[in-house]
Image (cartoon, grey):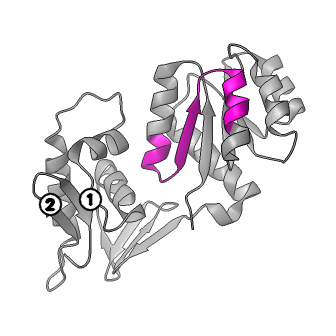
Amino acid sequence: MAAPLICVIEDESVIASAVAARLRAEGFDVEVAEDGPSGVRLCDRVRPDLVVLDVMLPGMDGLEVCKRVQRDRPVPVLMLTARGEESDKIRGLDTGADDYVTKPFVMTELSARIRALLRRTRPELVEERLEYGDIILDRGSRRVTRQGRNVHLGPTEFRLLDFLMQRPGRVFSRERLLDAVWGANTYVEVRTVDVHVGRLRKALRRPGAPDLIRTVRSAGYALDEHS
């Protein structure tokens, strides 16, 4: 099944980049537009499964964008509003938005709202449970098991495994993993990835079981049971 496609329409580039990086790390495909008219054109072209939409946009405000992207077909819309602007929230819901998050927001809240909205409107698109080989990752309970036994992971190792399990066999560079798991605007050493991959590898280790994390020299890492 293809990953859900989310359009982020947000004119603040720092916010748009951070939201896109977080959603991509969680397995979504993401397209970004920086103003109202280009957002409408983008949605017409790619037909997203959900739209994250700022209220205040150049060229066309979010309320008008909401009307236009839903003109031909229903699509879930989560609006971003400034804190305290209750009238914007009410108008957004009246216009056709399904939910809203106030700025400033926490990324975990935003992604949780998006998943809840997709579960309500497109439940077939959201998987809470990932399986690869003898590993099971349950996003809802934040639990990982291998061979039926619990694997204790820190938050970063959990996100790293989640990302790798979405794309088994594919090799990712340290820089790509850094952007996906830590965020594009997080300034940490690239070699930090090696430390956390090492911790993940150690936590997953089981007697007689293969090491599922493949190191590709000068390229990066992959989750691969055939390694």
Q: Are marks 1 and 2 in contact (CB under 8 Å)?
A: yes
Residue 159 on the magenta segment: no
Residue, disc 2: 216
- Secondary structure of the residue carrying tag 1 is loop
Quadrant location, the N terminus? bottom right
What amino acid type is highlighted by mark number 1?
Val
Residue 207, can we see it? Answer: yes
Residue placed under numbered mark 1 in the picture: 171
The image position of residue 98, as x and y in percent, is: 78, 41
**Residue at the spot 18% in from the left edge and 78% down from the top edge:** 206
Highlighted magenta segment, given as a residue range: 22-42
Along the horizontal axis of the image, is 96 left or right of 186?
A: right
Q: Quadrant of the C terminus?
A: bottom left
Tell me, yes or no, if residue 79 can be seen here: no
Q: Quadrant of residue 214?
A: bottom left
Residue 27 falls inside the magenta stretch? yes
In-image side of 201 versus 112 (left or right):
left
In the displayed structure, would residue 135 be above or below residue 173?
below
Find residue 116 and report its horizontal and vertical position in percent. Answer: 66, 51
Q: Is residue 116 above or below residue 101?
A: below
Tell which residue pokes out farthest to the bottom in this image: 208
